Amino acid sequence: MSRQVTILGAGLVGSLLAILMRRRGYPVTIYERRPDMRKAVIGAGRSINLAMSTRGWNALELAGLKEEMEQIAIPMSGRFLHQPDGSTAFQPYGKNGEAIYSVSRGELNKRLMTLADESGAEIHFNQRCARVDVPSNTLHLEETSDAGNTPSNQHSNTPTLQHSNTADLLFGADGAFSALRSSYSYMDRVSSEQKYIDYGYKELNITPGDGSTFRMEKQALHIWPRGKFMLIALPNTDGSFTCTLFMPFEGQDSFEALQDDAALKPFFEKHFADAIPLMPDYAEQFRTNPVASLITTRISQWHYKDKSALIGDAAHAIVPFYGQGMNAGFEDCTVLSRLMDEHSEDWSTILKEYQRLRKPNGDAVLELALMNFIEMRDKVADPRFLERKKIEKQIGIRYPEQFTSIYELVSFSHTPYATVMQCIDAQDRLLERVMSAGDFEEMSRQETFVEQLDSWMKEYHQDIQQLDFFGR
Ligand SMILES: Cc1cc2nc3c(=O)[nH]c(=O)nc-3n(C[C@H](O)[C@H](O)[C@H](O)COP(=O)(O)OP(=O)(O)OC[C@H]3O[C@@H](n4cnc5c(N)ncnc54)[C@H](O)[C@@H]3O)c2cc1C
């Protein structure tokens, strides 16, 4: 007899999970704190577009949505750098032209919700879970009537109707401020941490050119790396770009320091001169659009017996700098699905295995995302780093079976994030050796260097061959 599944949150991960559970015949009920986004006008949320990579596509394929979403996804095959001196450069992401894809968060969420609906999941909107009594799986729900514009970490001021409900098998897919995670955190021997970073972000928009044309290179993720802050832009299908400015809340070159036009204008003219003609109303947008904060969360317990589990941001909220939050959440669904194949209805084993396999990866992707922030805002403008990227590519071409860069492992493979983290030291060692040997192109014409390189590659291979590339 199938268990009754309850999911908190009809966001990206909750809706996908609902589809996958319905496909297996489980009755599914979702409680979502916001109104139905397919009907209501919801104020500007977090990032209008998202970068989807291999892990995300894989999960969409499971849900049967890959082909449809591919139609409205824009491939970005590399970083397009905008340097302070006005020069630009393109850095391909993969050695074989691989791309990450810009997709509309809203469209994707709406499609997933509709598919969940069509597959028979019951979605209750305006239902906020305040807390869960974990041992009894009792949900304390509040009926909300705000327009869905209250941030997840704040309560709506609107009066609420309260009721409770007991779940059979419960998934907390309720995002970074998860009620289920918070309820777990009060339990004995559960360690839980949430950290805000000192940086916030603000979205700005570059409108399309005449006839919905793109006013910058379309198939790239644009970056203006400026050391302590950065601007990025991802393309949308209507020809616009959504830009995100990441910078510290306080201090020099911060949101606090840019409160009026007198400070903002010279700042933009100095750092983002080539972006100004593309968004001449930047000052107005800057005044109007909110600054949002960035949080990371970790918790030692991802499930409670065979009764409940966390998934997606609820289990591992991360900073957005590797474009992996949604991808990691979708991969949680893929792994859970595989475990259901392997263990049928044995939920005690499924949830235990789910935590064993996914928690180290949740922790690892959190670290990778923080590391990539430094790479994006700072290192991509550093000539030594650029040289290293070129060499990585050459080595990847020369030794395609043995060497895949960290970026490629994260974005274009299913290698567990924890394994990717373990590859970093070995790759650093290899590349330090190669770079200290001199000019790579020149050296690689010398037979003795090629022999040396072969032997370094053998050592590299030995270093990584013990690692678990398949997540078992
Ligand atoms: C600026 C920015 C850029 C990003 N870019 C990328 C990217 O390029 N690629 C990528 O892979 N990821 C990216 N991410 C991360 C991505 O947005 C998240 O990882 C993803 O949205 C997680 O999906 P989720 O369903 O777990 O959580 P959410 O999308 O947060 O959905 C949670 C759902 O639960 C509902 N909810 C919340 N609390 C409750 C409650 N108490 N009761 C009931 N319902 C509740 C919410 O209303 C929401 O619908 C980015 C994040 C940010 C902030």
Image (tube, rainbow, N blue to C red):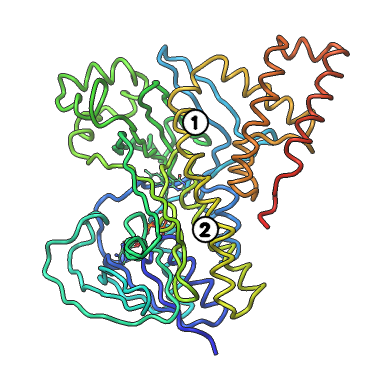
Foreground of the two, 187 or 325? 187
Secondary structure beneath label 2: helix
Q: Could you tell me which residue is drawn at 30 percent across and 82 percent down?
A: 165
Q: Is label 2's Cβ within 8 Å of ligand 1?
A: yes
Q: For mark 2, what is the residue?
A: 330
In the rendered view, would you say 35 is above or below 293?
below
Query: How far is the residue under mark 1 from the one under mark 2?
Result: 29 Å
Image quadrant containing the C terminus: bottom right
Task: In the rendered structure, find residue 217 and report the number of the disc placed on it.
Answer: 1
Secondary structure beneath label 1: loop
Give the residue type at disc 2: Phe
Q: Closer to the N terminus: mark 1 or mark 2?
A: 1
Please provide percent x and percent y for residue 75: 55, 42
Q: Could you tell me which residue is drawn at 73 percent across and 31 percent down?
A: 396
- Please tell me in which quadrant of the rendered image residue 310 appears: bottom left
Task: In the rendered structure, find residue 465 and report the number of the disc placed on it.
Answer: none
Please provide percent x and percent y for residue 317: 41, 50
In the rendered view, would you say 379 is above or below 199?
above
Q: Could you tell me which residue is drawn at 44 percent across and 47 percent down?
A: 50
Give the residue type at disc 1: Glu
Which mark is nearer the camera, 1 or 2? 2
Foreground of the two, 9 or 421? 421
From the viewer's perspective, is 443 left or right of 393? right
From the viewer's perspective, is 248 left or right of 192? left
Foreground of the two, 174 or 68? 174
User: How many other residues sit within 10 Å of disc 2, few (<14), some (14-19) or many (≥20)?
Assistant: many
Image quarter for ligand 1:
bottom left
